[in-house]
Amino acid sequence: VRDHWHTMTRTGMSPRLSAHRIEPFVEIHPDDATQYGVADGHLAQICSPTGQDIFVRVRVSERQQRGSLFVPMHWNAQFSSKARVSSLIKTVLDPLSGQPEFKHAIAGIQPCAANWYGFIISRQKPALKYSRYWARSRGKGFWRYELAGQDKPEDWSQHARTLLNVEAGEEWAEFYDRADGHYRAARFINGQLDSVIFIDSSILLPPRDWLISLFQKEVISAKERASLLQGLPPADAVDTGRIICACFNVGEKTICDAVQQGAGTAEQVGDICQAGTNCGSCRPEISELISQGC
């Protein structure tokens, strides 16, 4: 968790800093991921001999040592349903210092079973139900929730209205394919986008970045409304991707554009789009994008 550091375990007050990592995660080496049947971007359940478990998003990385897992400490009950990694660690104290055994523990990992996946972006906090997994982050004027569950409501349309406290007469647009488990809806108040909810039986959901950008607008255009339930921007819209540089609000796609223009180092990317030229904490991630060829 690059930007929030320890403050997220307490308040997470900065929406800008929350944008870098919005979900609890586990890093695992590719060989271990294959062995234990977990996939990058999917959910995993991590268990320990204490009998406790947590639910986190999988990040497969060559940087992670084989045979070990890494889970950050930053997510507590304010920000996720069950991701407090300290719950996996035995209450053993060092006999000399009295310090708890917080740095390591034996743990197992397996895929987290779910029958549906989704996300909510809303100006109000929803009253969650049926979610085995949820993680939330605070944005500028909105809350973002990532969701997954085994149990599901009989009617997603009715449940979504209850979740978001939709009142009679409010402007509400939705798409519902009951057979395939696809549900998408949006609420508008005085022409302004107030909330969106996307549910699917598959983990393959639209990117969130463009939808999030609509919450910064007083009124969205007719073209944007027409594309809203697809979750994809109109052809002529600018989509900068997820934010990499929090200092200058530079997105992944903007950085990749700089690489396509010939930037071969983090410094050269900074010369083109400013990313990484202030605090510098995003430079390793910029370098990783360059090495991957964007």
Image (cartoon, rainbow, N blue to C red):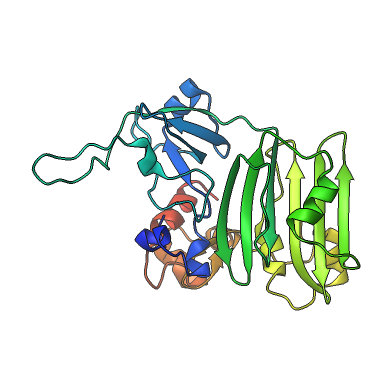
Q: How far across and down, in percent of the image, does residue 287 sit?
A: 42, 54
Q: How far across and down, in percent of the image, does residue 47 sit?
A: 43, 30
User: Is 7 drawn above or below residue 104 in the view shown?
Assistant: below
Tally the marks.
0
In the orientation shown, which residue stands out farthest toward the right? 169
Q: Residue at x 11, y 39 (%)?
A: 95
Q: Which of the pair 159/68 is nearer the observer? A: 159
Quarter of the image containing the N terminus?
bottom left
Q: Is residue 210 visible?
A: no
Q: Is residue 223 left or right of residue 44?
A: right
Q: Which of the pair 79/98 is nearer the observer? A: 98
Q: Residue at x 40, y 36 (%)?
A: 62
In the orientation shown, which residue stands out farthest toward the top? 35
Q: Is residue 184 visible?
A: yes
In the orientation shown, which residue stands out farthest toward the left? 96
Q: Is residue 65 left or right of residue 191?
A: left
Q: Residue at x 55, y 32 (%)?
A: 39
Q: How far across and down, in percent of the image, does residue 282 sit?
A: 42, 61
Q: How far across and down, in percent of the image, does residue 173 sit?
A: 88, 59
Q: Which of the pair 14/265 is nearer the observer? A: 14
The answer to which image quadrant residue 94 occupies is top left
Q: Is residue 67 left or right of residue 137?
A: left
Q: Residue at x 47, y 28 (%)?
A: 33
The answer to which image quadrant residue 84 occupies is top left
